[in-house]
Image: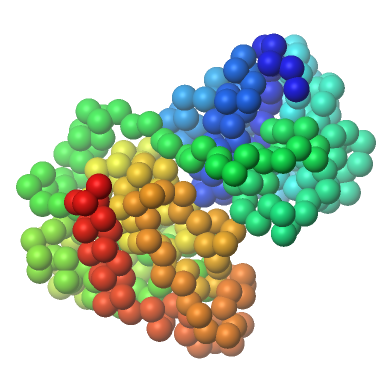
Amino acid sequence: MSTSEQKILVVGPSWVGDMVMSQVLYKFLQQSRPQVCIDVLAPAWSGPILERMPQVNEAITKPIGHGEPALGRRWKIGRKLRERAYDQAILLPNSLKSSFIPYFAGIPRRTGWRGEMRYGLVNDLRQLNEKALPLMVQRFAALGMDDGAELPEELPKPELVVNREQALQCKNTFALDSGRPILALCPGAEFGSAKRWPFEHYAALAREYLSLGWQVALYGSANDQPVTAQIKSLCKDDEYCHDLAGCTSLSDAVDLLSLSDAVVSNDSGLMHIAAALNRPLVVVYGATSPGFTPPLNANAQVLVSDIECAPCFQRECPLKHHRCMQEITPIQVAAKLRAISIESETR
């Protein structure tokens, strides 16, 4: 692959965690093609994440909803992008829809996994070997290489950059106490309830840390408010238990998570943000597996269910018992948090 200046358009993913993990590709491209210029075509919500990735030259908003065909609008966007004269497009989604804009933009090399039927639209079409590339970040990075080239053993990790002063201002805005360490809890998961550690377990962990003089910040979208409200209620509405679900923008959440002294999360987008901020992190896995989307963070610990039906990768528990998450206890999570603290002190 030539190292002369190249302009690349990356069609970004549609989920928060996947967008964070896509930074592995951008960092890898900069390492392997020093003169590369990377633009990312992505949903508007992803701006606060992409602007914290120095490798991204420009985030181009894709004003089309997830799953929306909108072929006419894709044609207009593609025609407008023609003037940028990209050398290559790299498509991270496997959908047919994601291939239209690079094709309409006349980008000569359009790289992606075979996915849905998009022959011709993607002219550098790759056949995925899932066993050879078990991790999502490996699959992203492999698209930045020639077909068949071998990935290096170590890939760069996501690493979001945050303005410390801006983060402290955000902390003041949401009235977090400067004198207490922050335990961030992320009990939501957009994928479905099967990925959620029970709110009663989160509440038990929160109560323990509140009793130790910490403060607890509950994060999530407006959809997570019923769950975070239950956690706060079980903490007897302690003034140091801050329910921020639905109150913060994604930008606020990134800033505030960067100040956390510890984070506990389901396998979710906020988990990947916390990992990319290098926060001490414990992740609870049941229906999904760290063998595909682990926290890429040396300060992370995982708890993985070992029951016979896990991981099922279903949105809802097909057997209705949710044992994979129920049986991972707050005591186990607290022990992992203590282990992270000990490791951090000995480094």
> Which of the 4 quarters of the picture holds residue 105?
top right
**Percent position of residue 76, x then y:** 77, 25
Question: Left or right: where does residue 150 sit relative to residue 25?
Answer: right
Total numbered labels placed on residues in the image = 0
The relative height of residue 82 versus residue 297 in the rendered view (above or below) is above
Let me know if residue 54 appears in the view.
yes
At horizontal 36% and vertical 69% (from top left) the residue drawn is 227
The relative height of residue 341 versus residue 175 in the rendered view (above or below) is below
Residue nearest the viewer, comparing 97 with 268: 268
**Percent position of residue 149, x then y:** 76, 37
At horizontal 67% and vertical 46% (from top left) the residue drawn is 139
**Percent position of residue 201, x then y:** 31, 76
At horizontal 63% and vertical 46% (from top left) the residue drawn is 138
At horizontal 52% and vertical 25% (from top left) the residue drawn is 55
Question: Left or right: where does residue 201 sit relative to residue 57?
Answer: left
Residue nearest the viewer, comparing 229 with 37: 37
